[in-house]
């Protein structure tokens, strides 16, 4: 029974345990007028910021009481704690798209050793082990993209194409109660209107006409898409002009490997750079890329999977060292994107002192990572890379052009594409971009207020908008 027993409007209560960017987990409690309630959550990700490490070990709700979980997409900050949730007693179904299910299985299995080593360094118990991943996957129910699932007598969830990642979905939840009008909620799921491998159609018109509460992220809310420096292609062309026999090493996140290969392959095809051999190094990157190239994902049309360059090889660990001393031009794509773990660490240790090498990072150099250390290092400075002091002679470049997060203009296009938003809740993002998106939403949408979700606030929202906001800080006081 629901505890709002005196006056119980038909509404949904939203809270989150996340204070900042990562660890996405939106908790939702549906309150029905007959005083019953349904507790569900959207995503259950890992807190990746070092200062929030301890938050990974607790939930602000009782996992046993959760009835079902919806997953928007398979990035670790949205799925990384699912095995822990199951270990702690959650036994309900987990709904996501078929492609997300595949990536989730692959990513979680591959994260077991990282979880173990991170916990070991801090003297903690690992969050979960392989067996917990296998148990969690038994609860996952994949459905085709652009279809819906009837969860119970009152709730339906529709999964629409989202360009953020293969399998990613923007989820519409509709909640029905007797003869009342349904409550509609859109969970953006790091919505992005484009993807290099498949089209992202606008949400159907009948959906955009509904009165909806919209959840949106704000990670890149501080910049517009025309401010992105699309420098990757130019940097490679320039480098090969100066070093015709040089080597380009590209630190890459495993789930982004196919996009980098496609970009490099297209440059070779149109003659911007010569058709040198392209290597991929890293177990996770190689396996994921093989999945993409073999047509394993239903969201990628079959005519988009022939993207591998003519000269292309997966590198095995045993022959990696041959690359360090090689003097023939080539391109090596190695995980991980931060330079902090995976085979890229070895490339940095062994090739950072070569003038004929370009390390081109494909993401923003986040403080605390090796990428950041290299970003900050002067030329010829000594840099400590995983215990080896190396003189910086290689060229180092960065681009955020491969980021899958929507920028301010794209986020606002998404929000303004709805004709009848009743409330907007900004999740995911540092304080500043979250505030910018909230302000923009207030200015451009015809709504009286915008919520910024965090562990400090709770929103009670009905079909027509916000009923009540309250601070969780005062929960225990009178
Ligand atoms: Zn994401």
Image: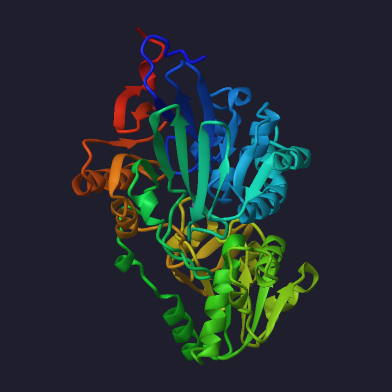
Where residue 86 sits, quadrant-wise, is top right
Q: How many marks?
A: 0
Check the image and report above or below for 167 versus 271.
above
Residue 424 visible? The answer is yes
Q: Nearer the viewer, residue 326 or 113?
A: 113
Q: Residue furthest right?
A: 318
Is 263 situated above or below 477? below
Which coloring applies here?
A: rainbow
Q: Is residue 20 left or right of residue 155?
A: left
Residue 319's spot in the image, x, y percent? 78, 74
Q: Nearer the viewer, residue 200 or 18?
A: 200
Horizontal side of 261 relative to 230 (left or right) equals right
Q: Where is 85 relative to 315, above or below?
A: above
Name the spot of residue 470 as percent of width and height, x first.
33, 22
| Residue extending furthest toward the top | 478
Quarter that holds the C terminus: top left
Q: Is residue 395 above or below residue 478?
A: below
Residue 346: give x, y in percent of width and height: 67, 65
Q: Is residue 418 left or right of residue 332?
A: left
Q: Quadrant of residue 307?
A: bottom right
Q: Quadrant of residue 258?
A: bottom right
Q: What residue lies at 63% left-to-right and 62% top-to-bottom?
A: 345
Residue 292, image x, y percentages: 65, 68
Residue 336 visible from this viewpoint = no
């Amino acid at each position: 029974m629901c505890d709002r027993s005196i006056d119980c409007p038909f509404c949904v209560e939203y809270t989150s345990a996340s204070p900042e960017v990562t660890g996405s987990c939106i908790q939702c409690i549906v309150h029905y007028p007959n005083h019953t309630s349904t507790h569900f959550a959207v995503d259950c990700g890992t807190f990746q910021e070092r200062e929030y490490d301890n938050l990974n070990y607790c939930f602000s709700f009782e996992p046993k009481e959760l009835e079902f979980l919806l997953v928007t997409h398979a990035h670790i900050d949205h799925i990384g704690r699912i095995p822990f949730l199951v270990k702690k007693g959650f036994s309900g179904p987990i709904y996501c798209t078929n492609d997300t299910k595949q990536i989730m299985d692959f990513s979680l299995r591959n994260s077991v050793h990282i979880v173990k080593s991170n916990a070991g360094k801090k003297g903690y118990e690992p969050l979960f082990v392989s067996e917990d991943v296998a148990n969690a996957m038994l609860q996952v129910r994949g459905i085709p993209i652009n279809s819906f699932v009837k969860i119970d007598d009152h709730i339906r969830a529709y999964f629409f194409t989202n360009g953020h990642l293969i399998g990613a979905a923007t989820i519409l939840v509709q909640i029905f109660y007797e003869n009342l009008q349904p409550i509609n909620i859109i969970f953006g799921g790091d919505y992005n209107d484009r993807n290099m491998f498949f089209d992202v159609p606008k949400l159907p018109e009948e959906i955009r006409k509904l009165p909806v509460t919209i959840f949106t992220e704000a990670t890149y809310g501080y910049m517009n898409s025309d401010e992105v420096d699309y420098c990757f292609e130019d940097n490679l062309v320039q480098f090969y002009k100066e070093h015709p026999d040089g080597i380009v090493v590209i630190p890459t996140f495993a789930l982004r490997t196919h996009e980098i290969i496609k970009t490099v392959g297209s440059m070779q095809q149109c003659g911007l750079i010569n058709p040198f051999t392209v290597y991929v190094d890293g177990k996770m990157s190689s396996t994921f890329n093989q999945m993409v190239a073999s047509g394993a994902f239903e969201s990628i049309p079959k005519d988009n999977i022939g993207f591998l360059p003519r000269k292309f090889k997966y590198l095995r660990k045993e022959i990696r060292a041959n690359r360090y001393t090689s003097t023939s031009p080539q391109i090596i794509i190695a995980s991980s994107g931060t330079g902090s773990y995976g085979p890229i660490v070895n490339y940095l240790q062994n090739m950072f002192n070569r003038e004929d090498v370009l390390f081109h990072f494909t993401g923003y150099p986040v403080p605390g990572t090796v990428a950041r250390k290299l970003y900050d290092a002067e030329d010829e400075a000594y840099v400590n890379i995983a215990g080896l002091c190396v003189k910086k002679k290689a060229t180092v470049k960065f681009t955020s052009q491969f980021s899958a997060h929507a920028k301010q203009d794209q986020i606002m296009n998404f929000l303004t594409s709805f004709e009848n938003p009743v409330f907007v809740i900004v999740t995911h993002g540092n304080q500043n971009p979250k505030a910018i998106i909230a302000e923009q939403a207030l200015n451009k949408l015809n709504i009286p207020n915008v919520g910024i979700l965090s562990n400090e606030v709770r929103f009670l929202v009905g079909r027509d908008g916000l009923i009540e906001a309250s601070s969780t800080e005062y929960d225990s006081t009178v």
